[in-house]
Amino acid sequence: MTERRASVVVDLGFGDAGKGTVVDFLVRDRGAHTVVRFNGGGQAGHNVVTADGRHHTFSQLGAGTFVPGVRTHLSRFVVVHPTALMVEAERIAEAGVPDALDRVTIADEALVTTPHVQALGRLRELARGDAPHGTTGVGVGETMKVMLEQPELAVRMRDLFRPAALRRTLERLREHAAAEAGPMEALDARARDEREALLSSEVIERWLEAVAPLLGRSSLVVGPEHLEGMLARPGEIVLEGAQGVLLDEWRGFHPHTTWSTCTTENALALLEGFDGAVERIGVLRSYQTRHGAGPFPTEREDLRRIDEPHNADLGWQGRFRRGWLDLPLTRYALDCSPVDGLALTHLDRVEPGWRACVGYEDLAVPLVPAADPHDLDHVEALGEALRDVTPILEPTPPDLAGWVSSALGVEVVLTSRGPTAKDKRWRHERDRFRDG
């Protein structure tokens, strides 16, 4: 009898550590039948390159979609951007995968980003001027804000099938967004464009027309029994996280965080009652990165020489920053979200003279999680303290994976020396976590 197994993939940094390429490898190596997304939304960007040179940046589709037959489930914790999902399906069809949407299911409880809410989130970021939070501009945070502060205005996937009530809610959202934006200054042309979107009722009809083809898929939106059946199915599933633990809504360094739980917490909640084996894999790079604003103790301008073919200094987040591997930050991430093994990526970028941060000088407060997981004052103070530290750097030995394992007390089980699945290696055969 085939066993049931689940692999949970989480990023231990600020995102962009290589979750997508690790998920693609796990799906292929372990024969997974489904990838479950357990946080975030349309702001994710998980890059996968196939052995034959095809590339796709996975946003809402699971990063195993290049593998024929592998399904994607967007769980109740995902904030869905319906029109972006359709655009993503068109793009991967151009890369030779025409049936991606046929393999997608979405939890009926999942929140939906609507156009006026997305525009409001962008306008808030523009109004911050020279002190941005680092939004991606996709509307995930603003959607969560509406759900928490005005839950009666929150749109969920099941609501898309109730057109009359949906139109009324969308009009109320337009009015809410316009009222919220009233005091904000229109700083530039982008801000004026966003304000026009907020004020337009025509946007509602255009959006409803745009999402209509998606709603014609009878098997797309599913109830909780679908997840139960999926978990009962023999074989492997991979739960794919988004962003990184250091951007977590409660554990990241406020206010430069995401409105999403980036630890393994959501994944483990989805797996409640699962009777198979579960492995948590934390992904980290051989060097640190951060896309956008926020504290970054080991940032180095000279490391901008490292090529980043899929991460540009573009979009709402701005610069894609690079720095030395930061062990204190990684220990903090592990304290917030323990894992069973590590995947160390981008080892092909390591060059002579490579270094890593092993500690800090002048750290004003201990770098530990707050006793109260919802203590934003604590994580904001940590972020301020991290701006003033001096990293203690040491050269790294040739066996970086072994050194990291020893330094962090968690074994590096998987290494990556390139963008494709063929560039991944289990460090030991026992790490394969295979049936039989």
Image: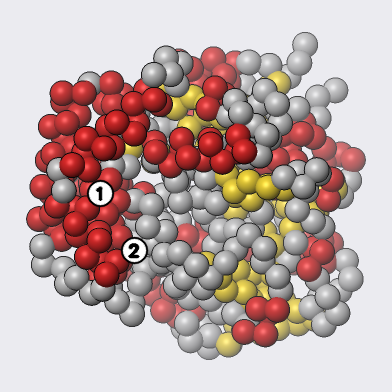
- Mark 2 residue element: helix
Identify the amino acid type marked 2.
Leu
Residue 431 percent coordinates (x, y): 82, 41
Local crowd size for mark 2, using a 10 Å CA cut-off: few (<14), some (14–19), many (≥20): some
Name which residue lies at 42% across and 59% down.
136
Q: Nearer the viewer, residue 258 or 160?
A: 160
Name which residue lies at 15% across and 43% down.
201
Q: Nearer the viewer, residue 111 or 201?
A: 201
Q: Which image quarter is the C terminus in?
A: top right
Identify the amino acid type marked 1.
Val
The structure's colour scheme is secondary structure
The residue at which mark 2 appears reads as 376
Name which residue lies at 24% across and 56% down.
120
Q: Nearer the viewer, residue 175 or 416?
A: 175
Q: Is residue 407 left or right of residue 388?
A: right
Disc 1 or disc 2, which is closer to the eye?
1
Residue 27 percent coordinates (x, y): 72, 34
Image quadrant in which you'd find residue 302: bottom right
- Mark 1 residue element: helix
Q: Is residue 338 left or right of residue 25?
A: left
Q: Which image quarter is the N terminus in?
A: top right
User: Looking at the rendered structure, which numbered label has been put on residue 117?
Assistant: 1
Residue 171 percent coordinates (x, y): 13, 39
Q: Is residue 250 visible?
A: no
Name which residue lies at 18% across and 42% down.
202
Image quadrant in which you'd find residue 392: bottom right
Give above or below for 133 relative to 22.
Answer: below
Residue 372 percent coordinates (x, y): 37, 57
Q: Is residue 100 left or right of residue 258?
A: right
